[in-house]
């Protein structure tokens, strides 16, 4: 699935403890921006122990060749990892997270719309007791075809998660290492890392960041990704609210459908018994029958899910933990 660009370093390879910040940058057909991206990140974090990880997600425009050049020119500082085909941004981030060696992990898009100079302030924000800092593109320089759908998406994400962020999908984020270790990204779940982290008990904050207009390449965003994002939002609701209580999710919908169907059939029964109306061929009769049957199936699915959960060996959600200096373990 992946190939890594390596070069013999001029100095001994840094160990995990030597690296303070890992910057993970997913790349897909962005060869024109990679050198400037490297220069900007390096300049912004020059005073920190740093590694920059470019994850080429199946580019076809020479991006991998540019990544290899940067890795050869800056051994020990730049690392390149290549997917054999395009798996998506979530998979690219998951690959980068797995390879990152720093105690702090930052992510940026490779199109130069994110400003690397924002990274020091976001890293400093972690010292206030937060575990994830998400960027907020308050003054966004994108076409209306991206900004309008994004507003609807962010509104829906706030509503279902209860997390009061303005911009869930900003590529500029900074994480503590333990957060990225706990994330399991696939599909389009990279949009929801603040929600996933929040659900695990991590503290999430937001900072306004500078956003630049795109100068090179073309956006990979489209209506297809917008639809996928909302479908994955439903997945997030299941994962964060109902993973340990499937009966509540399926049961609630089942009761709503079954109750509506029962009310419809009750109404039709009254019309038949007291007013002599013929109800056998009325569409409302069939709707009521379908809703009752569908509601029963959903409730049964929820009960089966509860049985499977109880007999799967799961002991419930374990709280996040961390080691204290005295060797004891503190539960959050």
Image (cartoon, rainbow, N blue to C red):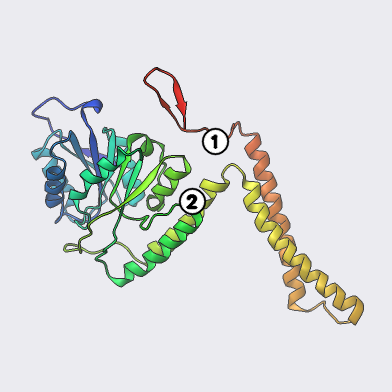
As drawn, 111 above or below 289: above
Q: Quadrant of residue 265?
A: bottom right
Q: Which of 7 and 162 is in front in this view?
A: 162
Q: Where is residue 211 in the image (x, y as percent from the top left)?
A: 23, 59
Residue at the image position 19 percent from the left and 62 percent from the top? 217
Against 103, residue 58 (above or below) is below
Q: Mark 1 points at which residue?
A: 317
Q: Secondary structure under badge 1?
A: loop
203 or 191: nearer the viewer: 203
User: Most extreme residue toward the top, as rendered?
Assistant: 326
Residue 312 in view, yes or no: yes
Q: Earlier in the sequence, mark 1 or mark 2?
A: 2
Mark number displayed over residue 236: 2
Residue at image coords 49%, 51%: 236
Position of residue 61 measured from the top left corner of the image (x, y, whole percent): 18, 56
Q: In this view, does 327 lie above or below 125?
A: above
Residue 250 image label: none
The structure residue drawn at horizontal position 26% and vertical position 45%, both measured from the top left corner, is 122
The image quarter containing residue 312 is top right
Along the horizontal axis of the image, is 286 left or right of 318? right
Position of the N terminus, as image quadrant, is top left
Can residue 87 be seen from the camera position used here? no
- Badge 1 crowding class, 10 Å Cα cut-off, few under 14, some 14 to 19, many 20 or more, is few
Left-right relation of 267 to 213: right
């Amino acid at each position: 699935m992946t190939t890594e660009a390596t070069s013999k370093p001029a100095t001994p390879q840094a160990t995990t403890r030597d690296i303070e910040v890992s910057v993970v940058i997913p790349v897909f057909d962005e060869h024109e921006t990679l050198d400037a991206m490297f220069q900007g990140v390096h300049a912004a974090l020059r005073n920190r122990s740093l590694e920059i990880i470019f994850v080429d997600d199946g580019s076809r425009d020479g991006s991998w060749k540019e990544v290899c050049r940067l890795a050869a020119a800056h051994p020990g500082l730049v690392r390149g990892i290549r997917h054999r085909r395009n798996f998506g941004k979530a998979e690219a981030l998951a690959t980068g997270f797995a390879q990152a060696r720093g105690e702090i992990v930052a992510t940026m898009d490779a199109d130069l719309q994110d400003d690397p100079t924002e990274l020091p302030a976001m890293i400093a924000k972690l010292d206030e007791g937060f575990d994830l800092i998400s960027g907020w593109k308050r003054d966004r320089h994108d076409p209306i075809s991206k900004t309008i759908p994004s507003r609807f998406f962010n509104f829906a994400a706030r509503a279902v998660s209860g997390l009061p962020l303005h911009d869930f999908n900003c590529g500029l984020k900074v994480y503590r290492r333990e957060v990225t270790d706990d994330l399991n990204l696939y599909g389009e779940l990279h949009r929801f890392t603040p929600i996933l982290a929040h659900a695990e008990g991590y503290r999430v904050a937001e900072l306004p960041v500078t956003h630049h207009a795109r100068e090179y390449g073309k956006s990979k965003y489209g209506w297809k990704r917008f639809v996928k994002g909302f479908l994955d939002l439903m997945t997030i609701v299941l994962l964060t609210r109902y993973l340990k209580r499937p009966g509540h999710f399926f049961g609630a919908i089942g009761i709503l459908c079954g109750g509506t169907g029962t009310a419809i059939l009750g109404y039709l029964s009254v019309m038949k018994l007291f007013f002599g109306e013929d109800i056998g061929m009325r569409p409302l009769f069939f709707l009521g029958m379908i809703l009752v049957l569908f509601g029963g199936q959903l409730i049964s699915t929820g009960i089966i899910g509860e049985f499977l959960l109880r007999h799967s060996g799961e002991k419930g959600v374990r709280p996040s933990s961390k080691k204290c200096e005295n060797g004891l373990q503190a539960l959050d």
